[in-house]
Every structure is written in C-alpha cells, then in structure tokens.
Amino acid sequence: MKKIHLLPIAFAFLTLISCDQDQNEKTESEAPLQEEIGQIQKAYAPDGRVALFSVDAEKQEDGIILKGETNMPEALDSLKRKLRASEVTFVDSVLVLPDTAALESKILGVVPISVANLRDEPKHSAQLVTQVTLGMPLKVLKREGGWYYVQAPDGYLAWVDYGGIENMTTAEFTNWLVAEKLIFTDTYGESVEEARTGSAMVGDLVAGDILQLEGENGGFYEVSYPNSKKAFIQKSQAKPYKDWLASLDQTEESLVKTSEKLMGLPYLWGGTSSKGVDCSGFTKTVYFMNGFVLPRDASQQVHAGKLVDSTRNFKNLEPGDLLFFGRPATDSTSERVVHVGMWIGNDHFVHSMGEVHISNFDTTATDFDEYNYNRYLRSKRLLNEDRDLMLNLKDEKLFVQDSI
C-alpha cells in the first residue's frame, strides 16, 4: 500500500513540565535534560500547524517520565537518543499516533461531503482553521468523541467531526484509490438522484470535489461517494479526473482564468473552497484547480517558490506570482506575514479581502490600493519553481492510481 503523500514537512511543538520546581530553581542535574529538549525544539518545532509533538517530561525520584503524544516517531527517537547520550534515566510513556487500536485500524479517511470544516479543537464552536473538499484523502491520528484529529495532504492538522469523514482501513482506502474518479469543475453545483434535469438533489458540490466515476448515462456521469452513496452529475460540470489532469495547461494564463471564476466569493476565515475563502485559501484554491497543492497559510506559502521581488519593482512579476503582505522584521520583532494575493499583470493583483476582488498598485490611479502597497513584503514565483513545498497532481497519485 502506497502511503498518502503528505508535504515533506515535519514540525513539532514540545513542552516541558517539572512537577515541583519553578523554572528558575532547576538543579544542575536537570540541565542536560533541558538542553536536550531545547535542541529537539529547535530542530523539530518551527510550525505546530503541520505536525504534533506534545511531550511533557516529568521528573520523579527514580528518573524522568516522558508523557504525551506525537505523530513524529523520528523526533521522539531523537529525543530519547539524546537523553541516553546524556545518561538521563527515563521511561517512555509517549503515545505514537495514529492510535491504531482506538481507531479500530481505520487510520485513513476520505471526505464524503462537498466541503468539510476543520477546527482547532474538537467542538463546533472552535475556530475554523481550514477546509477539505469531497474526495480529499486524510490521515487519521486519533479520536475524541465524535471528532477525529486528521492530517490533510498539505500537512495541516485539525479536527473534523464524524460527518466530514468516511473512515477507512488500509484495504478500504486502497479500493477507493484505485477506482476511476471524476472531478467537479464548475464553481458550484449539485449531484442528483436520476440522470435527468429536475431530479432531486443528492448533495451540493464545489470546484475540486472528487467522486468515484461509475459510468455515463446520456448527458450525465454516474458517480458514487466515498460512503457509497450514488448520484448523477451533468457532464458539462465535470470531467473524468485523468482527462482533466491531462488537459491542464498549468500556465500563467490558466491561473488568471481560474481566479476570474472565483471573483466575488465572500471572505471566510479558514475557508479554502467555493463556499468562501480567506486570502491563502483563495490562492490555494486557484492553484488546486490547476493541479497543485499549496501549503495552507500565507505564512507557509511565503516559504515556497523563488523570490522575484522585495523592493516593489512590480515589473519583475509575472501573472500567477504570489504577493505577500504584513509586518517586516525589526531589531526587536520578527517578520509577520498576514496576507497573500496573486499577480495578474498590469499593476493589478487579485486577492480575498472582504471578497475576492482586484486591487491596483499603480500609484497614479484613482483606485490605488495604498493600504496593501504600504504593507507589501515580497513576491514569490511558484509556477515551475517549487518541487518541495508544492505538490503537482500530475506527479503525485493523490486521488487515483492504477495499482498499489
């Protein structure tokens, strides 16, 4: 079984708790432990959004007990090697995820609804941090009540409720992966019960939804959902996945054309779909509909691709380049990237701010966007420039492959 290809990012969050002593009262005997944990933090913990390494080290009379959980066994192994090298006695009680036993071996999953909302805590009142669309494969790490802690193909970690995931064993996921697929290409739409106009709706659909292709019936495709629900989709609104992938130009022009289809979408914090997008959700959706999977947030996307400008020399930019905005670094504060848009040429860029719209960087124009001009940081070129932080669906068998 080929593993789901997640972005090659392994990050962590590590905490240290001592039972009875304040941080300022650490004894010399604890110094090696503090040093080793600090080294692991520095090596594995630049971004807790894309990996879990929550480990507590509790000091007891007979040594150290490591507690917590992680989906990064390599980080835990590194910590233990360092502790042994420092002759620190410890007991390893860290749970390495996925929690296969608690999940009853269903450590994989596929999104069965048009858009699933992922949150930073296992409750509906928690913050929406990202979305995943129908057919998206997920790695399942653990369960808490009716919620699952999952990792998306872009590496992002968050909680989804039971209605947003069809849990699968490895064998069940394999059967889904080798089946023919269909991608919904319109911005909005629906699947219906019968292959005829006016038939009752089975479910709503958004751009990028992936379903299993079962056959054709007149002007409709027959499809099935990851939970085996059957439906029909008009041929004018979708394409067989392999045909769609082969037809993608993946050019500057195709990126701009896709952005035009999303004009006017409302801003939604955490949104990455046609139902609403935040700034990085918009750029992520534009690139996805051209066959690329980008990192989730603006502060992650900024690390992808090739630097093409940092001095407001917009003549260097090409359509499809990403522009990043925020607060530059100072002697006392670090840089903070808070916004991203996409260049479309002629001093204009498109972005989600209030709604998806076009802004002007021509300083002489009446609609000059002075606010974003003043907080501009730099621009990056991702198209044909990044093979590390950006997945190309033409190379990665994320949704379908011929054999396992």
Image (tube, helix red, strand yellow):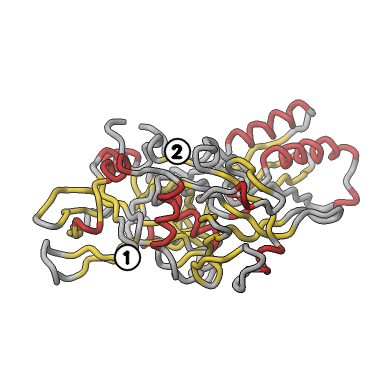
Mark linked to residue 188 = 1
Residue 142 at what x, y percent from top left? Answer: 48, 50
Q: Secondary structure at mark 1?
A: strand
Against 101, is 265 above or below?
Answer: below
Q: Residue at x 35, y 39 (%)?
A: 170
Q: Judge by depth and name the residue closer to the eye, 285 or 152.
A: 285
Nearer to us of marks 2 and 1 is 1
Amino acid identity at mark 1: Tyr
Q: Is residue 68 visible?
A: no
Q: Judge by depth and name the residue closer to the eye, 386 or 32.
A: 386
- Marks 2/1 in contact by CB < 8 Å: the verdict is no
Crowdedness near tag 2: few (<14), some (14–19) or many (≥20) residues, C-alpha within 10 Å:
some
Q: Residue furthest front?
A: 364
Q: Residue at x 82, y 53 (%)?
A: 20
Residue 324 at what x, y percent from top left? Answer: 63, 55
Label 2 or label 1, whichever comes before in sequence order: 2
The span from disc 2 to disc 1 (Cα, nearest Å) is 28 Å
Q: Judge by depth and name the residue closer to the eye, 303 or 322.
A: 322
Q: Judge by depth and name the residue closer to the eye, 14 or 263.
A: 263
Say which residue label 2 marks.
5
Residue 289 at what x, y percent from top left? Answer: 39, 51
Q: Residue furthest top?
A: 85
Q: Residue at x 67, y 68 (%)?
A: 370
Against 366, is 32 above or below?
Answer: above
Against 201, is 171 above or below?
Answer: above
